[in-house]
Image: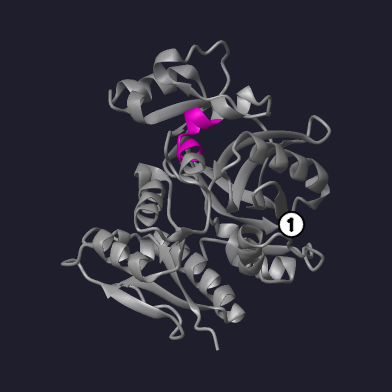
Amino acid sequence: MQSQRTLLVCEFITGGGLVGADLPESLAREGALMRDALLRDLILLNEWQIITTHDARVPPPDDKVNSHAITPEQDIWAVWRDCMALADAVWVIAPESEGVLLRIAELANANQALWIGATQEAIAISSDKYRMAQVLAKAKLPVIPSYIYEEWMPNNDGSWVVKPNDGAGCAVTFVFSNAKDVNQWFDADARRSHTHIIQPYLLGIPASISVIGSKHSIIVLSCNLQSMRLHHEQLSYTGGVINGAVEYWVQLSELAQQVKEAIPGLMGYFGIDVLLHTDVEYGISIIEINPRLTTSYVYLNEAIGCNPAKLVLDAMFKECVDVTAIKRNLVEFNVEN
């Protein structure tokens, strides 16, 4: 009987990435949800010996997984390096911010571990919102324009979005009602002009696409609605409805394929955040790309009626993927509960 291959699942927040620092409850909760959903799907496959790490401050994962507790006196990057030396493959859940996801990908490559996910080039492009917007615009895709502060020249009195250029999700995203407030925000700290970008605030329905990329094609798993809250000029993500945007399935599938053609290294699972414009029939604008598992993954097994981890692995390692079982069930969720 052939022995099982070893797979390292590395979730940055709960896996020790913040060891020795504060561990925000909301981030730990969301990270644990994604970690546990992926582990659940992998355990059901019964094809891998799974290893992982967990911050000693959070509960360990499923007892079917060999998890190493991380304490402040340990160097988490050295631990992950050693785990990668033992693993045949690596599947990482980590934010793009501060180059974290890219650094882990480089570590896996240095240890010759098989990487389940986007290439380093695709991660680098997607992690830099300004660069990503330029790449997609060059490919004639409908991306919301991004500006660095020194080149920004507002020509209207509309609202503006200010966000970290390398931030993940809605991390520290602000909405200002006029250009004067934007200028005051940047003037308050000169460093912000080097770390944040500006985008026009467009009206529309926030949505996302859950996608699997293979060498030459894509599989759309779900088309989702997102719930956002704007409070004291700060935008936050509160949840959504998996498959709440199925009426846009054809248009979003075409857009996902075009994004993959513009950034061919988007392999494995990735998400695309978009705005749906109700004033134009099937009008869509791209907000950003997430080259990793997103919160939507937590609810995909229920929404699509099959194992998304199997689909990802098949797309990366097999010539053909059976998508006939994919359903379009509605699943509503709230990340604040």
Give the x, y percent position of residue 329. Answer: 77, 65
- Residue nearer the viewer, 101 or 263: 263
Q: In the displayed structure, does residue 163 sit left or right of residue 75?
A: right
- Residue 314 lies left or right of residue 120; in this view the side is right
Which residue corresponds to the image point at 35% horizontal and 48% vertical from the top-left? Answer: 103
Judge the density around disc 1: few (<14), some (14-19), many (≥20) Cα neighbours within 10 Å: many
Residue at 79 percent of width and 65 percent of height = 327
Q: Position of residue 77 (x, y in %)?
A: 27, 59
Q: Is 130 contained in the magenta span?
A: yes
Q: Give the range drawn in magenta.
A: 124-132
Q: Which residue is drawn at 41% across and 52% down?
A: 105
Give the residue type at disc 1.
Answer: Asn
Decide which of 100, 6 is in the foreground and name it. 6
Q: Eyeballing the image, is 228 above or below 283?
A: below
Q: Residue at x 53, y 32 (%)?
A: 132
Q: Where in the figure is residue 97, as x and y percent of width and height?
A: 39, 44
Q: Quadrant of residue 186?
A: top left
Q: Main secondary structure of the magenta part?
A: helix
The quarter of the image holding the N terminus is bottom right
Q: Name the residue under label 1.
A: 243
Say whether residue 99 is visible: yes
Q: In this view, does 150 lie above or below 266?
A: above
Label 1 residue SS: loop
- Residue 190 colored in magenta in the image: no
User: In this view of the protein, can residue 175 be seen by the observer?
Assistant: no
Rendered location of residue 226, percent (x, y):
63, 50
